[in-house]
Amino acid sequence: MRWPALLFPMLFGALPGPADAEAVACEQITHDGQPYTICRVDAAQDLRLFLYNEAGEPFGQFGQVDQALNAKGARLAFAMNAGMYHADRAPVGHYVEDGEELRGVIASAGPGNFGLLPNGIFCIGADRADVIETRRYLDAPPECRYATQSGPMLVIDGALHPRFLVDSDSRYVRNGVGTSEDGQQIVFAISETPVTFHEFGRLFRDRLALPQALFLDGNISRLYAPGLNRADFGRPMGPIVGVVVPAAE
């Protein structure tokens, strides 16, 4: 559910400021006739994952994360749901927050999209961020301040996931993330209409020209982009990824 822009200041407490535009650049684009919203983030920005508040309860909504940051003199400039989760909102796969591993890597195949190997891990390091295929991650574990595992991979070394079908009839609103070869550019994307995996993967491969990309979730996909006057709401989420900036004075 997407709420009218009129409600955003009331729910989040502040209109977007100059820091938002400097930290993240969001825009609406069309690729192969499908509309998407993409948000580009430089690795130098303060990009984090959020799951539990200080009381140990899941944040669940972008507004709850923003309120917690406000109390510390900061706020969200962008956010998106960041991986699949169980009914209690615990992550399905590998999860690291502020250097602490909350769940180990799952390398085996399984049911659903997560188990459609190869899947992957989005790793936010000290000076770069990368989407890494899970087996490679295990072979050479990187230093991740934050990490979230999801699946399937959308793009692997510039090629679409081998099990994507061009004529698939499975369509959902989907969101994902891709990274540049040097780990300095991160692009998040959400479809504005239901798309297939093949269509979504082609966005990252052909339009965004990113060598690695990872599916984060579908159907419950949501975006917080104050620069676009957008804050999506719905049932509570699990992991959330967001860019943090100083609170507006």
Image: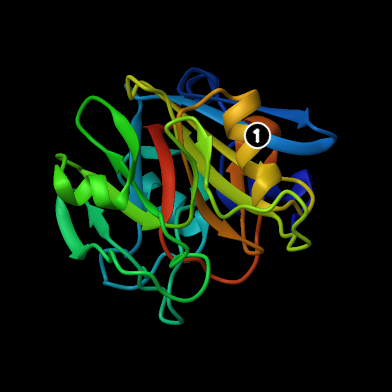
Residue 78 appears in the figure: no
Taking depth in this image into account, of 11 and 121 the one nearest to the observer is: 121
Which quarter of the picture shows residue 132? top left
Taking depth in this image into account, of 134 and 122 the one nearest to the observer is: 134
* Residue drawn where x is 45% and y is 49% of the image: 66
* Residue drawn where x is 66% and y is 63% of the image: 219
The colour scheme is: rainbow
Relative image position of residue 55 (x, y in whole percent): 27, 71
* Residue indicated by mark 1: 203
Relative image position of residue 68 (x, y in whole percent): 37, 53
* Residue drawn where x is 46% and y is 82% of the image: 87
Residue 58 appears in the figure: yes
| 140 on left or right of 130 | left
Residue farthest to the right?
33
Image: 101 above or below 108: above
Check disc 1 and report its element: helix, strand or loop: helix
| 246 on left or right of 170 | left
| 119 on left or right of 44 | right
Q: What residue type is labelled 1?
A: Leu
Relative image position of residue 200 (x, y in whole percent): 65, 44
